[in-house]
Image: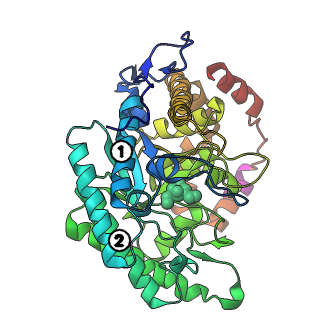
Amino acid sequence: MTDYFKNIPAIRYEGPESANEFAFRHYNPDEVVMGKRMADHLRFAVAYWHSFAYQGGDPFGGQTFERPWFGDTLALAKLKADAAFEMFDIIGAPFFCFHDADVRPEGHDFAENTRNLEAIVDYFAAKMETSKTKLLWGTANLFTNRRYMAGAATNPDPDIFAFAAATVKTCMDATHRLGGQNYVLWGGREGYETLLNTDLKAEAEHMARFLHMVVEYKHKIGFTGTILIEPKPQEPSKHQYDYDVSTVYGFLKRFGLENEIRVNIEQGHCILAGHTFEHEIATAISMGIFGSIDMNRNDYQSGWDTDQFPNNVPEMALAYYEILKAGGFTTGGTNFDARIRRQSLDPEDLILSHVGAMDTCARALKAAAALLEDGALEAARKARYAGWETPAAKAMLTGGTLDGIAARVLDEGLNPRPVSGRQERLENLWNRFV
Ligand code: XUL
Ligand code: CO
């Protein structure tokens, strides 16, 4: 036991009228929404890196937080784990996520990194025997250490490719051992700064081989979770190879990986790519590669990946609407890839940021479910495409040819009239539910 969160009570649902800061107003884990417990719909996860490893730095200044577990020893890494599992209990987190570098001290070489990781995995495993919190996903940090400055799987140096591959092996082992439901690959440095020193074709082929090895190893060890790629358009690299969902899909298809790897979609990354969150989610669903979400928001003025906690209910509702419509998460969930601001120094800030974000998501889920159950939006969407039910329309898709269609257009004297897209009417409908 640590005394880090000593004065903070376990957070319970008290309903929308409660004025208690340390209570949920909307997230009621056992409440049934569309036939399923809210907790089972949302599948919240705490991100270890932001809540326990982030020290408060920004590009102009270093550490602002003082946490008793900061430091690079195994004893401190265990203290960090103690505090983390205490926080998971306080907020009732069903899941957590971690990178190797968040949980273990940095070693001098691969062997020491592996020993340190295994020691912490043992420590987690013992805690998880009694904890209610499970592992949503594990991942390898292949971007912080200077060895990865020119990439991991796409590094021009084959020894760094090898170091990264060996590291992913250990992280997949850790994830498998802890019962993780997914394994994530975010290619922070898989991209480039200047074409003057970059061989695009070679880098793509190396990354594809790397991903095939990940898939092969997954099957070899009997890991039944989902392998996920997390798209992001830039930052840290100027040009990232995993720009957005469509780019990732094209890459997977090009190298025959589209049935093995899905995507973990992060709100802030979508915005950086010039898309909305719901666009990226709907795109992934339409391509059959939707996996999980990283929930956060960026500052809308700065244009950086500021990883703030979500607080915009209508926006999140659009995202959950697409997820619910597609049948909900399977192995995926809602990972709060979000950190408190560097001035938010108190233990309470760590807890209440999650409480607010869980409430935001719960409100969004309920609004999305109500609209889906109402059915008016889907009916309108279906009506817009109703013309495709006619035999002539269907025939164009099955055996249509340009000259055959041209003959029919002439023959029937087709002169179609545009119809309203009714955007504002649909926005009004949407607004009745959020
Ligand atoms: C970086 C980011 C990562 C991934 C995991 O922008 O989102 O934290 O989620 O490596
Ligand atoms: Co993320």
Disc 1 is placed on an element classified as loop
Describe residue 237's horizontal placement relative to residue 86 as left or right: right
Do we see residue 213 in this rendering? no
- Compare residues 415 and 352 and report the one nearer the observer: 352
Q: Residues within 10 Å of mark 1 (few under 14, many from 20)?
A: some
Disc 2 is placed on an element classified as helix
Q: Which residue is mark 1?
A: 330
C-alpha distance separating marks 1 and 2: 32 Å
Amino acid type, callout 1? Thr
Residue at image point 58% right, 24% down: 376
411 part of magenta stretch: yes
Is 362 drawn above or below residue 277 in the view shown?
A: above
Residue 256 lies in what quarter of the image? bottom left
Q: Position of residue 338 (x, y in %)?
A: 56, 45
Is 162 drawn above or below residue 216 in the view shown?
A: below
Residue at image point 61% right, 51% down: 56
Name the image quarter holding the N terminus.
Answer: top left
Describe residue 75's horizontal placement relative to residue 249 as left or right: left
Residue at image point 51% right, 73% down: 145
Residue 93 lies in what quarter of the image? top left
Is 76 drawn above or below residue 165 in the view shown?
A: above
Residue at image point 34% right, 65% down: 171
Amino acid type, callout 2? Asn
Q: Which residue is mark 2?
A: 113
Q: Position of residue 53 (x, y in %)?
A: 49, 53
Q: Position of residue 22 (x, y in %)?
A: 50, 21
- Compare residues 242 and 325 and report the one nearer the observer: 242
Q: Which residues are magenta?
A: 408-412
The mark lying in front, picked from 1 and 2, is: 2
Do we see residue 418 in this rendering? yes
Q: Earlier in the sequence, mark 1 or mark 2?
A: 2
